[in-house]
Image (cartoon, rainbow, N blue to C red):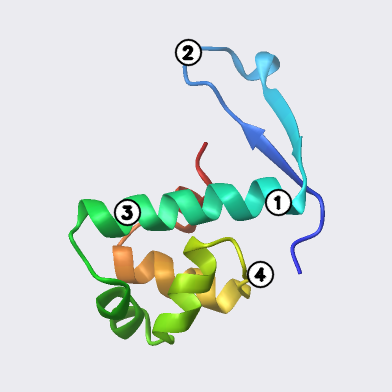
Amino acid sequence: SINNIILIIFNKNLFASNIKLKIMNNDNVRKILADNVRLLRTKRRFSQEAIADMANIGQNQVSEIENEHSNPSLDTLIKIANAFDVDIVELFRL
């Protein structure tokens, strides 16, 4: 499960000493992940089934992630990021 996660968000326009720190709970992280997976998928005009095939995961798993009903493993997140050809951090970008 995704426990409380500390995400450090670097604002490219600020100096390193001005790092923003935001504490996120599980629901926030699931929402960000869901929104980003859906956005990446729809921008590329992929169906849930297509991205699931590319990531070698079940279509139901993609649906559960997009509907905030899943705590995917790190392996699953890596597969999804690779299927989209993005760095894994893109799945959690605010």
Left or right: residue 77 versus residue 47 is right
What amino acid does circle 2 point to?
Asn
Secondary structure beneath label 2: loop
Q: For the point 73% across and 31% down, which residue is it?
A: 22
Q: Residues within 10 Å of mark 4 (few under 14, many from 20)?
A: some
Q: Which residue is mark 2?
A: 13
Q: Secondary structure at mark 3?
A: helix
**What distance separates the C-alpha of mark 1 from that of mark 4?**
10 Å
Is disc 3 surrounded by few (<14), some (14 to 19) or many (20+) residues within 10 Å?
Answer: some
Q: Are marks 3 and 4 in contact (CB under 8 Å)?
A: no
- Check if mark 2's residue and mark 1's residue have beta carbons within 8 Å: no
Residue type at mark 3 is Leu
Q: Which residue is mark 3?
A: 40
Q: Which mark is residue 54?
A: none
Please tell me the numbered disc located at residue 27: 1
In the rendering, which numbered label is found on residue 71?
4
What distance separates the C-alpha of mark 3 from that of mark 4?
18 Å
* Relative horizontal placement of residue 72, taking residue 22 as reference (left or right): left
Q: Position of residue 92 (x, y in %)?
A: 53, 48
Residue at horizontal 52 percent and vertical 77 percent from the top: 76
> Distance between the Cα atoms at labels 3 and 1?
20 Å
Q: In this rendering, would 24 be left or right of 32?
A: right
Q: Position of residue 24 (x, y in %)?
A: 74, 41
Q: CA distance from mark 2 to mark 1?
A: 29 Å
Element type at marker 1? helix
Q: Nearer the viewer, mark 2 or mark 3?
A: 3
Across and down, in percent, residue 93 comes to 50, 42
Q: Is residue 58 left or right of residue 6?
A: left
Q: How many C-alpha atoms fall within 10 Å of the one at disc 2: few (<14), some, or many (≥20)? A: few
Q: Is residue 5 above or below residue 57?
A: above
Helix, strand or loop for disc 4: loop
